[in-house]
């Protein structure tokens, strides 16, 4: 009885008694949710266009952030010397984006093209390999110590009533929202965007639109690279550029399950739900089990969800044929 | 053929007023027919007539919204495919659905899964292998070898099926279905994509299966020549509806059928 | 030896021998047949038991001594057993070729007044059944395989199982009957009638006795120490003397194991499976295996290719010597052992020849190159001179003196001479009893002293080695003086992997010409390597590059012929390439793959005339079957080339 | 080249269905066993056993487990580390809770407990496939790591949070604990792993293995011919987990001795085992062993070459190792998704028909 009280009643009572704290928790959750959404977006884009579940998306973000820091601090690749001129943030960002495009081209050439028409599961495992390569490569080029990243996003906080708001979080949310809108417009209203959507359904159809498959793949992997760059900047600015950045990819996986592998809105809503859900769970239920449930709560949430709706919130219904 | 006018055998399967839709799309509309014990029954119709859907309904892969199916005179409730298989319905597929990582022999052995003694192939026995599991394996291997010999595929017994030409794959798939010793065998376009010689072989095998084992056969086929030669009775579907049912000669003369095949507007 | 001789005397018929084995080694394997995926073994005791029931079944059906029973089908244990079952009651088995048509069978069935037939499967039953109205003597048909037989009217038809059941019922009433039936047989009795397909004329039924077959089987086996431990693969037509000699007569006399393949499709994998110790085949099979081997090596990587050629050159020098136990230097011996490890051994393994104690080629002359190929890689291949009329054996090469171009000296008990026309004449313990219902032919072939006219043209050298040159009837004169044996030239041509068959012509003409049939696989590969596409055999055979290729082959042969004085005049002057392959179904080859020269000469008369004229091409119907209607589209233009000069091949004309 | 198969005909189905139907393969196996049981113990050093042979055997066993699930049944799992942790913890709790219990029994029970946990996490496979399932197994990985880290009962409330295997004997010979001789531990591992591998081979070549492969190759067709997809997959999950669990238990007791569960069996272990089966060969028993040897030996070789011979810094060498393995995975997936085992099989087929090319 006491146990039930502890699990079911007490946390709810807490929420109601201290609403401003609860709102603060939810708000914090929403902010990390935005980050999850960003990474999940990268997954969804690639999955939609090439049917590849890109496990290395998180490492993409890490790699982008490492490159950005390296350029901004004037680090010479493969050495830890900082003897190059330091670049302003906007130049470094553009250069990093170019690097990410180069990476997309390389991935298409070296990994995807030889594996075209292979089983999805094989493609998936190859991206695990890719993650390892990029992680080793990033560390080799830029060094593996924790680096600070500051591209000039304002920090600080202010209060609305009793609720404390981080200015950085607001910026992050704003940028993420902007990115999503841009992508939505790109996919909805440009010819290339429509072709990208077509290719997910039918490779032949895409070819008939007149865009070679390899270009489509390069474009979509570049876009995913851009998304990774933004995610890398956000996470990197917040908690430093380091290996653990690549682990946020793993956090994005339950988001995908929740939102569906093929749905852009799904990725966003899913990210928010997971972000809020795990924060709330951590704060209100975490202490009961000695905390740190953040690591797995999202997964269990997603799993339970899966049992009821295998295709995710916004995913396409799976029709099996013989 | 195997059927004579004097003694009309009972129906092994009756399809009664079946309607099947996918969302707004009606694949099958109020179709009824029966399959008599020991006959070769053809289901024909133009593309998109709902033939494969019909087979899928019969073996429990799709669940119709309306109507019922009587198998051996019993109304069949919502049934899972593996239950249909257990009830004696085996089938082949339009696009060969073999287990491409396995050999011909192993593929046909999978068809015996329901005939194996559950206890002899239970986990612990199978881990130990020597003893009951091996005995069971050998017992069923013997049966499968008879099928291999029947279908004249001795030379490819141990070849991974992925390496076989299409015609042979179809034959192996028939073997896998036969391994289940079915009462009712559903063949989805058994001759699609075959050359003349392979078609002749397949026809011979189908007739022999029917004659030697007394297996009732329902088949979908596009090659009209084949259908007319093989089948005892033919049911014709068009746009999900039944438009004719009868002997090959009757169906051939039916105006609806002629129209459907010539594409006359309804 | 004496024991064996005694037991032979006592067990003077094949059924008696069977019972002897069943008593002496009941549990050793008499037969194996690959069936349902494994080699199912039948012991001698089981074999005897099955024969007993079948024999009693036949007896119950009213089969009497001297009745003739046709046996037709592939090599299966049951069909082999049915020979004994028929013989056990004193009746005479008459094996037929399973790929003969009903029409071809009908003459034999009529002449032999066949009482019943034992068929392997539905296909053979259908053929025999279709003849029952024509051949009134047929009273029953027995079949082995149940497949497809369910719907047949079983009035005169039964399965071997039913037959055995009838036999079983009979046995329960009279358990001793089988033994007494077998006892009535005598060694001098007629054991079998084998119809020779004959490269000329109509088939003749050769009557062979138990005695003759057993003696020649024993004599040949003793020469090569064939023991009861051997495994052989029975795959040759039951109706061929070579198969009957090895898989039946020697099998019973020696007691080794006969293995029957699963199906004709799996023959070569079954051969590899069994790895026989003792093997017999007509030259055609050996030729095919060599051609395949060479073609496959040709497609192998460069390293393997050069290894192969390196070791084959070595084997050229020492291989045969090592096989014959002659002295060879230590380094060569070592290199050969190495070659055996990485090239010869694996090749033999893939062909199924790595356990071969002795292999025979018989029935027709074999080309030197093919013959020596096997000996070089360590397969003890020898020539045996088989004729149906001698119960399968007359001369056999002995292990220590194998001459490529001879069939060996006359074996023990065999005498041989050459008459003034050059015909080989011999007398053997296996002498046949005569041609069935053909006194005239018998008189022509078998004289009152027991000498048999072989019909072969040949010579005997100082050491008594017999050399067969050709069928007497085929040999002729070139430019009215030179002795011309076409088969000799043809075999030399066939040494080329690109040439599958060849027909040399020129008897009564001024020069020798050749019609070449190219090997589809080897030639096809050759063109593909050169990057040339073709559709079908006709286009392939008529390709300019193929003509060049063959011309080169012929040039080489001509150079070789020019070295020998009496062959120099037989160089090939002109040749053409046939647009189709020769086929036993069209009557161009016998079932054992020998050329039916008469038939072919008749069919290709126009082509042969053109070869010996100065025409540069000739138009032929694409199928030579006169029965088929000829339309314009089915004409083929065959080129004819001179062997010597490429320039005047007449293409431009 | 060395094969002389001709003449090795089979007169019974049991001979035809033997694991090594070709005599030459049998001999190779005998040679292998002689080396493993005689040559290795004779020449091996403490380092050799501890750093190479024992981990190779243990990872081979874990890979066998994952191969059953992924290679044979087609269900991708990223939770191998978590299940190894279950095995290790179960082993620890069983030995400390029931000090009298036979060590072999402890290992088997640890496997069975892990099988139960695996079964639980296999339930989502009823509804989900492919990547979804892979993600579900990741959940297992994180949840289990957290559980063993946070709940002190699993560590018997030791303040350091590490679990330490107490000494145990088998047939009077110490196999666990500080005093156990490395060679004895190796031999025990060898026997145990070989027996379990044999059992796994028996499973995959029999009816159960066929049901798994049927589900893997074409699950819909499998269901239509009478396989129950859910039961079949659950069986694969639990059998797979059993093997992984035993491997985890062995890693604690026979190899590491003392571990901090969440660290020793983290997600990298999951990846490591996955890499073993990709490089070794999906759907091949031999592949699990070859892959394990490769994954254990390669870093040692790489470190020796890069740090020892080329004078690189250890941390840089580590980064190179990452790239090397990642690149290798991509290479194998492109060139031969069935790994070294398949390459070996191709080589073997070539040797069998040598000198012919096909």
Image (cartoon, coloured by chain):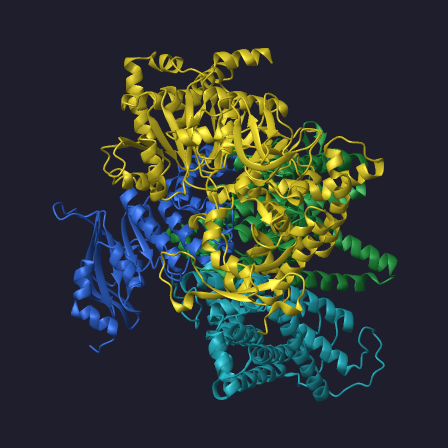
Chain colours: A cyan, B blue, C yellow, D green
Position of residue C419 relative to residue B223, above or below, is above
Q: In front here: A251 or B202? A: B202
- Residue A80 image position (x, y, % from top left): 83, 74
The residue at 84%/59% (across/down) is D307
Q: Is residue C315 left or right of residue A299?
A: right
**Residue furthest toward the left?**
B6
Whether residue D184 is visible: no
Q: Is residue B25 left or right of residue B175?
A: left
The residue at 70%/53% (across/down) is D295
- Residue B108 image position (x, y, % from top left): 43, 46
Whether residue C172 is visible: yes
- State the count of labels: 0
Q: In front here: D289 or C468? A: C468
Q: In front here: D264 or A320? A: A320
- Residue B31 image position (x, y, % from top left): 20, 63
- Residue C590 image position (x, y, % from top left): 47, 43
Q: Quadrant of residue C550?
A: bottom right
Location of the C terminus of chain B (image quadrant): bottom left
Position of residue A191 relative to residue C551, above or below, is below
């Amino acid at each position: 009885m006491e146990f039930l009280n502890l699990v079911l009643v007490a946390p709810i009572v807490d929420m109601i008694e201290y609403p401003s704290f609860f709102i603060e928790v939810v708000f914090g959750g929403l902010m990390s949710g935005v980050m999850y959404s960003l990474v999940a977006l990268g997954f969804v884009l690639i999955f939609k266009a090439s049917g590849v579940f890109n496990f290395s998306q998180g490492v993409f973000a890490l790699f982008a952030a490492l490159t950005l820091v390296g350029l901004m601090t004037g680090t010479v690749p493969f050495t830890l010397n900082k003897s190059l001129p330091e670049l302003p943030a906007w130049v470094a960002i553009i250069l990093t984006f170019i690097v990410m495009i180069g990476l997309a081209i390389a991935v298409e050439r070296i990994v995807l093209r030889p594996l075209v028409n292979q089983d999805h599961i094989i493609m998936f495992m190859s991206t695990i390999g890719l993650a390892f390569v990029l992680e080793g490569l990033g560390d080799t080029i830029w060094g593996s110590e924790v680096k600070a990243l500051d591209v000039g996003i304002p920090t600080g906080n202010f209060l609305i009533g009793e609720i404390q708001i981080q200015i950085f979080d607001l910026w992050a949310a704003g940028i993420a929202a902007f990115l999503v809108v841009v992508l939505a417009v790109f996919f909805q209203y440009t010819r290339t965007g429509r072709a990208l959507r077509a290719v997910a359904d039918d490779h032949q159809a895409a070819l008939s639109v007149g865009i070679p498959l390899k270009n489509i793949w390069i474009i979509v992997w570049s876009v995913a690279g851009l998304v990774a760059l933004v995610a890398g900047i956000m996470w990197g600015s917040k908690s430093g550029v380091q290996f653990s950045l690549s682990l946020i990819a793993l956090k994005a996986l339950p988001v995908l399950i929740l939102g569906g592998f093929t749905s852009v809105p799904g990725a966003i809503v899913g990210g928010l739900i997971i972000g809020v859900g795990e924060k709330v769970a951590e704060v209100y239920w975490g202490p009961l089990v000695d905390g740190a449930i953040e690591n797995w709560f999202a997964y269990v949430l997603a799993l339970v969800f899966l049992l009821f709706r295998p295709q995710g919130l916004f995913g396409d219904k799976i029709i099996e044929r013989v | 053929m195997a059927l004579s006018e004097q003694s009309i055998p009972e129906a092994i399967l009756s399809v009664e007023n079946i309607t099947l839709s996918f969302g707004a799309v009606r694949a099958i509309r109020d179709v009824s027919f029966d399959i008599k014990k020991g006959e070769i029954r053809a289901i024909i119709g133009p593309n998109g007539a709902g033939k494969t859907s019909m087979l899928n309904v019969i073996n429990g892969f799709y669940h119709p919204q309306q109507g019922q199916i009587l198998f051996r005179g019993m109304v069949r409730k919502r049934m899972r495919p593996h239950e249909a298989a257990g009830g004696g319905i085996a089938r082949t597929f339009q696009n060969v659905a073999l287990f491409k990582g396995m050999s011909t022999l192993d593929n046909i052995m999978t068809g015996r899964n329901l005939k194996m003694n559950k206890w002899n192939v239970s986990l612990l026995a199978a881990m130990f292998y020597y003893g009951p599991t091996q005995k069971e394996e050998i017992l069923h291997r013997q049966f499968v070898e008879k099928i291999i010999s029947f279908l004249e595929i001795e030379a490819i017994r141990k070849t991974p099926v992925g390496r076989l030409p299409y015609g042979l794959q179809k034959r192996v798939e028939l073997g896998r279905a036969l391994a289940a010793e079915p009462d009712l065998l559903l063949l989805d376009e058994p001759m699609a994509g075959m050359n003349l010689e392979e078609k002749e072989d397949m026809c011979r095998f189908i007739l022999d299966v029917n004659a030697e084992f007394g297996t009732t056969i329902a088949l979908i086929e596009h090659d009209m020549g084949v259908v007319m030669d093989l089948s005892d009775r033919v049911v014709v579907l068009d746009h999900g509806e039944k438009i004719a049912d009868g002997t090959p000669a009757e169906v051939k003369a039916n105006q609806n059928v002629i129209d459907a095949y010539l594409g006359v507007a309804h | 030896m004496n024991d064996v001789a005694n037991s032979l005397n006592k067990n003077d018929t094949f059924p008696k021998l069977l019972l002897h084995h069943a008593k002496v080694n009941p549990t050793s394997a008499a037969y194996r047949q690959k069936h349902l995926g494994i080699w199912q073994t039948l012991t001698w005791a089981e074999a005897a038991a099955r024969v007993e029931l079948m024999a009693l079944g036949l007896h119950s059906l009213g089969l009497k001594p001297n009745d003739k029973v046709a046996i037709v089908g592939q090599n299966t244990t049951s069909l082999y057993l049915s020979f004994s079952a028929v013989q056990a009651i004193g009746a005479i088995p008459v094996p037929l070729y399973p790929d003969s048509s009903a029409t071809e069978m009908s003459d034999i069935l009529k002449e032999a007044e066949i009482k019943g037939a034992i068929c392997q499967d539905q296909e053979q039953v259908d053929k025999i059944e279709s003849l029952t109205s024509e051949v009134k003597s047929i009273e029953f048909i027995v079949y082995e395989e149940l497949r497809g037989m369910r719907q047949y009217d079983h009035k005169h038809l039964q399965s071997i199982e039913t037959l055995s059941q009838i036999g079983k019922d009979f046995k329960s009433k009279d358990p001793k009957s089988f033994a007494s039936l077998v006892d009535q047989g005598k060694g001098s009795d007629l054991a079998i009638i084998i119809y020779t397909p004959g490269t000329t004329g109509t088939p003749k039924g050769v009557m062979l006795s138990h005695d003759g077959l057993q003696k020649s089987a024993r004599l040949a086996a003793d020469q090569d120490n064939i023991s009861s431990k051997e495994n052989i693969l029975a795959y040759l037509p039951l109706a061929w003397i070579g198969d009957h000699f090895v898989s039946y007569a020697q099998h019973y006399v020696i007691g080794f194991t006969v293995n029957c393949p699963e199906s004709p499709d799996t023959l070569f994998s079954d051969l590899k499976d069994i790895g026989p110790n003792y093997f017999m085949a007509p030259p055609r099979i050996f030729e095919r295996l060599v051609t395949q081997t060479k073609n496959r090596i040709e497609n192998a990587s460069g390293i393997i290719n050069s290894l192969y050629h390196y070791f084959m050159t070595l084997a050229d020098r020492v291989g045969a010597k090592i096989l014959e136990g002659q002295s060879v230097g230590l380094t060569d011996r070592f290199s050969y052992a190495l070659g055996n490890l990485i090239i010869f051994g694996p090749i033999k393994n893939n062909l199924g020849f790595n356990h071969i104690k002795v292999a025979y080629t018989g029935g027709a002359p074999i080309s030197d190159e093919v013959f020596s190929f096997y000996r070089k890689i360590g397969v003890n291949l020898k020539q045996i001179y088989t004729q149906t009329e001698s119960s399968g054996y007359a001369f056999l090469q002995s292990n220590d003196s194998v001459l490529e171009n001879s069939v060996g000296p006359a074996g023990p008990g065999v005498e041989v001479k050459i008459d003034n026309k050059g015909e080989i004449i011999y007398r053997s313990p296996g002498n046949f009893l005569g041609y069935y219902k053909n006194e005239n032919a018998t008189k022509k072939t078998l004289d009152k002293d027991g000498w048999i006219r072989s019909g072969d043209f040949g010579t005997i050298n100082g050491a008594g080695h017999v050399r067969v040159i050709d069928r007497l009837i085929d040999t002729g004169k070139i430019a009215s003086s030179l002795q011309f044996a076409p088969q000799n030239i043809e075999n030399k041509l066939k040494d080329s992997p690109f040439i599958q068959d060849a027909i040399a012509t020129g008897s009564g003409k001024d020069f020798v010409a050749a019609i070449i049939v190219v090997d589809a696989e080897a030639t096809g590969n050759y063109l593909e390597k050169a990057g040339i596409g073709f559709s079908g055999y006709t286009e392939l055979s008529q390709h300019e590059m193929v003509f060049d290729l063959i011309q080169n082959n012929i040039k080489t042969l001509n150079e070789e012929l020019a070295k020998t004085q009496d062959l120099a005049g037989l160089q090939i002057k002109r040749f053409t390439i046939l647009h189709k392959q020769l086929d036993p179904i069209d009557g161009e080859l016998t079932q054992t793959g020998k050329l039916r020269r008469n038939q072919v000469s008749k069919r290709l008369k126009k082509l042969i005339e053109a070869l010996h004229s100065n025409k540069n091409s000739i138009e032929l119907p694409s199928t030579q079957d006169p029965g088929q209607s000829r339309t314009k589209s089915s004409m083929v233009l065959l080129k004819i080339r001179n062997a010597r000069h490429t320039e005047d091949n007449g293409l431009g004309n | 080249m060395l094969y002389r198969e001709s003449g090795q005909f089979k007169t019974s189905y049991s001979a035809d269905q033997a694991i090594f139907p070709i005599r030459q393969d049998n001999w190779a196996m005998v040679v292998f066993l002689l080396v493993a049981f005689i040559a290795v113990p004779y020449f091996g050093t403490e380092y050799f056993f501890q750093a190479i042979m024992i981990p190779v055997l243990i990872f081979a066993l874990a890979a066998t487990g994952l191969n059953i699930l992924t290679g044979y049944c087609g269900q991708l799992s990223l939770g191998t580390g978590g299940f190894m942790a279950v095995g290790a913890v179960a082993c620890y709790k069983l030995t400390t809770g029931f000090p009298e219990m036979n060590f072999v029994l402890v290992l088997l029970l640890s496997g069975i407990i892990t099988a139960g946990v695996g079964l639980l996490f296999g339930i989502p496979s009823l509804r989900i496939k492919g990547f979804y399932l892979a993600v579900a197994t990741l959940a297992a990985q994180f949840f289990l790591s957290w559980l063993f880290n946070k709940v002190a009962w699993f560590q018997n409330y030791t303040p350091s949070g590490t679990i330490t295997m107490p000494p145990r004997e088998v047939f009077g010979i110490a196999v666990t604990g500080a005093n156990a001789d490395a060679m004895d531990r190796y031999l025990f591992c060898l026997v145990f792993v070989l027996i379990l591998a044999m059992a796994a081979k028996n499973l995959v070549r029999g009816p159960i293995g066929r049901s798994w492969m049927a589900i893997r190759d074409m699950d819909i067709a499998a269901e239509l011919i009478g396989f129950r997809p859910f039961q079949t997959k659950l069986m694969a999950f639990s059998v797979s987990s059993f093997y992984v669990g035993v491997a985890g238990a062995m890693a604690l007791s026979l190899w590491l001795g003392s571990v901090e569960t969440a660290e020793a069996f983290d997600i990298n272990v999951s990846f490591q085992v996955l890499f073993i089966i990709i490089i070794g060969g999906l759907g091949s028993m031999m592949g699990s062993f070859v892959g394990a040897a490769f994954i254990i030996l390669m870093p040692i070789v790489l470190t020796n070459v890069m740090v020892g011979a080329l004078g690189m810094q250890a941390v840089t060498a580590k980064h190179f190792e990452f790239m090397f393995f990642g690149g290798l995975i991509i290479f194998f997936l492109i060139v031969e998704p069935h790994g070294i085992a398949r390459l070996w099989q191709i080589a073997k087929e070539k040797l069998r028909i040598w000198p012919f090319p096909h």
